[in-house]
Amino acid sequence: MPENQLQLTFPSGPVRKLATGWLTLALLSLVGSGLVVLLVILARVPVIHDLIPWTGSFKTALVIHVDLSVLVWFLSFAGLMGTLSLSHRAIQLGRASLATAAVGAFLIAFSPFLGEDAPFLNNYVPILANNAFFLGLTLFSLGFFAVALTTLFFRREATGEGEKKLDFGLVSAMVIAFFALASLLWSYLAIPESLSLLKEERYYELLFWGPGHILQFTHTQLLMVAWFWLATATGSRKVAPLNLIIPLFALGALPALLGPLIHLIYDIDAIEHRTAFTDLMYWGGGPAALIAGLWVFRSQWNIQTTQDKTRPQRLALLYSLVLFGAGGWIGFMIDGVNTIIPAHYHGSIVSVTLAYMGLTYHILPGLGFRRPAPNWSSWQLMLYSGGSLLHIVGLAWSGGHGVQRKTAGAAQGLETIADKIPMWVMGLGGVAAVIGGILFLVLTFKSLRTKRTELAS
């Protein structure tokens, strides 16, 4: 690997198997999420929601969908990225981390069948208030933070200057995750006793508000790592100025370190506490990603030809940039508690997901598996990104008509055709995105079934 290439070296032996395990867990979380996402989408579509008997389960389905498709998927992929550079000395700790996280994810997915159906739609980590869910969330978190520790303290030496730059971004992301954990513990101890005893939705809103905002910086750092790696994978000779990459990651990380200061200054149940964390993410989360996005976008214009095998990586990169920009732009339109808010964060979430999809296609051969057919991969990315774009446009459009977030069925108040058309657009885009997500899973699991050595023989 050339020293100035912005990519991570693929592991061998037991570490490769461990990385494959984290990838499999990440993919299985999308399987579980997909099984409930149709319920979430169809429960909001006019006419259809009157034909189905389970719109009362909308909130429970939404809790499981969000936690699997954001928390488990994102952090499992973070575990994969951290494991790629794991030293063989920590392989036993790595295996224990993966096993713990996998058991936790399983319990989260099946918790609606293992206890009380009491959903709370608080932000960042919505809660299903039963013991199986809490045990699953605890075990998955323990597994992730254990692999984060191995990423920080048991790394093999980088093989080139470019890999060292990405290593800095990866390590900074894991450090921020521990700041989020500290914020969670701080919030737990700071919540007034009157709210702690009730354990209602406001309790969980306060509990996860600070750490949820800080954790977004972890995802942004890893998104930039993925962008740089994908841009390199497309054949770009100069993705970004090497001497500015570490300062860029530092710029992305520094705002997250202000979290403890917010805890010190404001009471957790004060409006200033909530506003401070919102402003921290609003103003601190974008500049570094915007600069990185401009660099990698410009790098694509320097590519004269794109090989078929790298076309999916390039499409994933470009679509990720588009969805990131769309989500950010919609964020400036937020006014009130309506569906413009989920339109905003869906753009950001899909941007990260697209980057991870492209990176999955790229790293499968490096983990010893065959590469999915580039044509199918390209169609899958276009279907998923196009459907997602329609989905968030429909949500933002509906928000302009006053449709409230976290509602379904008749509670949405869709009375006129003008009210219903945006939600039809949302539903059409959502279904297309789900089909694109299913195709992604089919392609990747099919690849995981066939090793490159088997093909060679």
Image: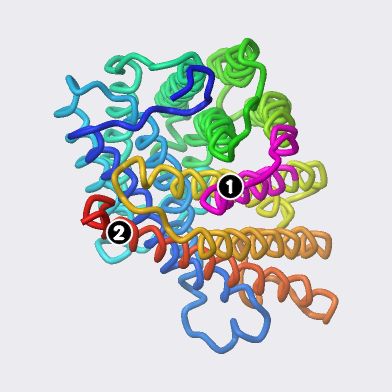
Residue 310 belongs to magenta span: yes
Along the line of sight, which residue is nearer the eye, 318 or 436?
Answer: 318
The residue drawn where x is 27% and y is 17% is: 154
Q: Is residue 123 visible?
A: no
Q: Magenta region's main secondary structure?
A: helix
Residue 147 falls in image quadrant = top left
Disc nearer the start of the sequence (2/1): 2
Q: In this view, does 129 lie to the left or right of 167?
A: left
* Vertical position of residue 284 compared to residue 427: above or below: above
Q: Are marks 2 and 1 in contact (CB under 8 Å)?
A: no
Residues under labels 2 and 1: Cα distance? 24 Å
Q: What stretch is highlighted in magenta?
A: 298-325
Q: Which residue corresponds to the image point at 43% horizontal and 25% vertical from the top-left?
A: 1
How many C-alpha atoms fall within 10 Å of the one at disc 1: few (<14), some, or many (≥20)?
many
Quarter of the figure with the C terminus:
bottom left
Count of numbered badges drawn on the protein? 2
Q: How crowded is mark 2: few (under 14 residues within 10 Å), some or many (20 or more)?
A: many
Q: Horizontal and vertical percent for residue 376?
A: 51, 65
Q: Of discs 2 and 1, which sits in the foreground?
A: 1
Marking on residue 445: none
Report x, y in % for residue 398.
Answer: 77, 65
Give the camera-side residue of 127 and 240: 240
What residue type is disc 1 on? Answer: Ile
Q: Pick the residue in front: 229 or 254.
A: 229
Tell me which corner region of the image, top left, top right, bottom left or bottom right, holds residue 196. top left
Q: Mark 2 points at which residue?
A: 111
Judging by the rendered image, the residue that carries numbered circle 1 is 349
The reply to whether residue 14 is in sight is yes
State the image coordinates of residue 10 (x, y, percent, origin top left): 34, 32
